[in-house]
Structure formats: structure tokens, C-alpha cells
Amino acid sequence: VLIRVLSRRSSAASFRAPVATSARGFSTRDFLKKVDNALVEDKDPKATRAALADGSEEEISQYKTMLGGCTRTGFLVNDTELKGSVLALPRSTLLWRASRFEDVSVESLALLPLIEPRIEILLIGSGETVRRPNEEIVAHYRSLGVVVEQMTTLSAIGQFNIMNSEDRLVAAALLHPSADPGAEPEP
């Protein structure tokens, strides 16, 4: 969904390439057919979501993102290793160019306001240390009605999985714990 919607709205330069994640039994071809059918004649987002959600609860839940933890170089997402930092969404995951805490900015998170349905909570995994959130990010997303929480990456992974399993509209911007070796925590 995001791949095609993004090409219409904006090109977010701060993301590498969309990565389709899959759960057991996921058929990318069938899902893309469903997306193409839903986007015919530029239906409004609510109609598109309704068309995509047309199916059993079990079928819908198989598309949920499940973060399995960190590997030496990336993250385990739905039993697939993704190298580097990631932006996890309720039903998809993208590789993310941010590699250090300083790279996390409103611009690097420019995709989030474009997502429908709107994300309500943004979790920022800042590596191995807890750091004070960037006030510009907090103010920007607060004006959009999004709560920003910053924590260690491992805490953000657990929090994301819990909230996503509860069908909360959550996103997690995750830096690998090795992103800033030796970084000092904020007071």
C-alpha cells in the first residue's frame, strides 16, 4: 500500500527502499492485486482501507508487523533480517537511512504524516541509551496529534509489539543499538 501511495503523494528521500514483510501464508501478488483494485479510480483513503480490510480477522492479522529483536547488523522483522535502522509500521516495515541519533529529525520521519490511517504514537528507539527527545520532533508531531515517546531500542521493540497487537496506530523509528557506541545518556 505504502509503495504505491507514496509515489503519488511525495518521495521521502530519507528512506532507502520499501521492504515488504511477510507472515506465514502471505502472498505478495494477491495483496498487490487487492491494492490495485482498491486504488482504481482514486477512491478516498477510507474506502481503500475498507477494501483492503475486506476479509477475515485472521487474514488481516497475518499482515501485522512483529519485531523479533536485534541481530548483529539490523533487526528481525516477521522472521526476516533487515540490515540497518528501520521504521516499523503496523503492517509494514521500511529500511530507514538514519544511522545515528543525530540523524533522527522531522525530515527523516517525513513519511509518517502521509500514512493513513494516521499514526497516533511514535516510538523512537535511540540505541542503547535513553536520550532526551528532539524538541522539534516532539512539537511537530504534537501539532499533528501524535504522541512521541523516546526510549532504548530494545524497549521500543517490546512496546511496539504490545501496542501493535492491541491494534493501536503505532510506529517505531528504530536505530540499531550499536548506532552510537559509547554515547552518554542524557540526565
Image (spheres, rainbow, N blue to C red):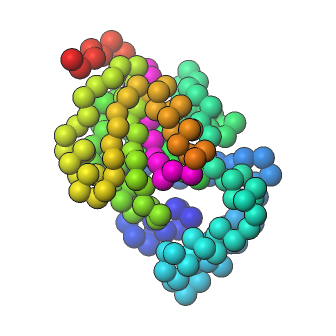
Q: Position of residue 2 (x, y in %)?
A: 52, 62
Q: Is residue 25 above or below residue 103?
A: below
Q: Is residue 16 magenta?
A: no
How many numbered markers are drawn?
Answer: 0
Q: Is residue 84 above or below residue 34?
A: above
Taking the spot 33% from the left edge, 12% from the top edge, the residue there is: 182
Taking the spot 34% from the left edge, 33% from the top edge, the residue there is: 150
Asked whether residue 34 appears in the rendered view, the answer is yes
Q: Position of residue 115 (x, y in %)?
A: 44, 61
Q: Position of residue 37 (x, y in %)?
A: 65, 79
Taking the spot 35% from the left edge, 37% from the top edge, the residue there is: 149
Residues rendered magenta in the picture: 167-180
Q: Nearer the viewer, residue 117 or 18?
A: 117
Asked whether residue 93 appears in the rendered view, the answer is no
Check the image and name the residue furthest to the top: 182
Q: Nearer the viewer, residue 132 or 32?
A: 132
**Relative to 14, 84 lies left or right:** right
Magenta span dominant secondary structure = loop
